[in-house]
Image (tube, rainbow, N blue to C red):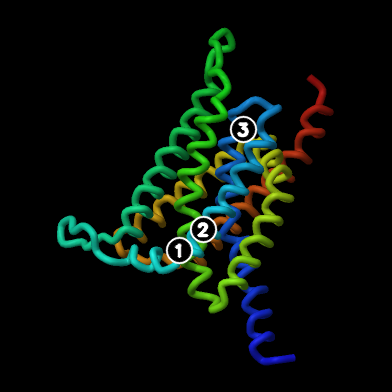
Amino acid sequence: MDATLIDAALALLTLSAMEIVLGIDNVIFIAILVARVEDAKRERLRRIGLLLALGMRIGLLMAIEWIMSLTDTVLTVMQNELSGRDLILLAGGAFLIAKSTHEIHDKVEGASRPADETPKAAAGAASVLAQIIAVDVVFSLDSVITAVGMADQVWVMVVAMVLATVVMLVSAKPIGDFVEAHPTLKVLALAFLILIGVMLVAEGLGQHVSKGYIYFAMAFSLVVEMINMRVRKRAAPVAHSEPS
């Protein structure tokens, strides 16, 4: 095989894996958002959200020269030079932190709400879709910049993004259903999103944080929570079998 083709194949495999990993937080956020709409609309909104994310990634990739121009300074605040990319990351990080904190608050307050109090109505599809688009912009920008740094051929980047989106489309519903069925896991997922939001704000302020640390913390916390879920599942039958 030609050396160029081999390099392209390796880049495609590596970038596809990286895009899938980077897409996990996007899938989790979409899953939490669509949980607020009516059951009949969830799957359609989930697919629209992921397809919009793919469209944005490919669109930004085609406008790569414009993406690179976002590194030019457009604003200086307290001796910190902020580029267009920094402003997008700051806005996206703040949005993630605010939205995830609100969702955690609603989860806690909802659990303690009196039985006779009327719960909130399901969120509107248009509102949820607008929030999905807003966060897709941030995640797409991060994804495209990562892709440009890992591959040289545009077709490799596009194929990797399409493959990653296919994987996300297939796994989005099972992940969403699993997160929604386990309240503690949902809170953990929201905590992850707050962590990612803090990382985006730090990146926007010029403080680089290795994503490896973030994903390791997420994986470790997830393993611990899985063990807790298994312990609770085993303890439940014992508790029911004890005489009252």
Residue 177 position (above or below residue 56)? above
Residue at 67 percent of width and 73 percent of height: 13
In this rendered view, identify the residue nearer to me: 228 or 150: 150
Measured Cα–Cα span from mark 3 to mark 2: 28 Å
Measured Cα–Cα span from mark 1 to mark 3: 33 Å
Task: Name the residue tied to disc 3.
Answer: 35
Residue 15 located left or right of residue 241: left
Which numbered dot is residue 63? 1
Task: Sort mark 2 into few (<14), some (14-19) or many (20+) by Cα contacts within 10 Å.
Answer: some
Measured Cα–Cα span from mark 2 to mark 1: 6 Å
Identity, as a three-letter code, of the amino acid under mark 3: Ala
Residue at 40 percent of width and 49 percent of height: 93
Whether the residues at callouts 2 and 1 have beta carbons within 8 Å, the answer is yes
Task: Sort mark 3 into few (<14), some (14-19) or many (20+) by Cα contacts within 10 Å.
Answer: many
Q: Position of residue 119 (x, y in %)?
A: 55, 16
Task: Name the residue tied to disc 2.
Answer: 59
Q: Position of residue 182 (x, y in %)?
A: 67, 37
**Count the marks: how many?**
3
If the image is split into quadrants, where does the N terminus sit? bottom right
If the image is split into quadrants, where does the C terminus sit? top right
For numbered disc 3, what is the local secondary structure? loop
For numbered disc 1, what is the local secondary structure? loop
Residue 82 position (above or below residue 177)? below
For numbered disc 2, what is the local secondary structure? helix
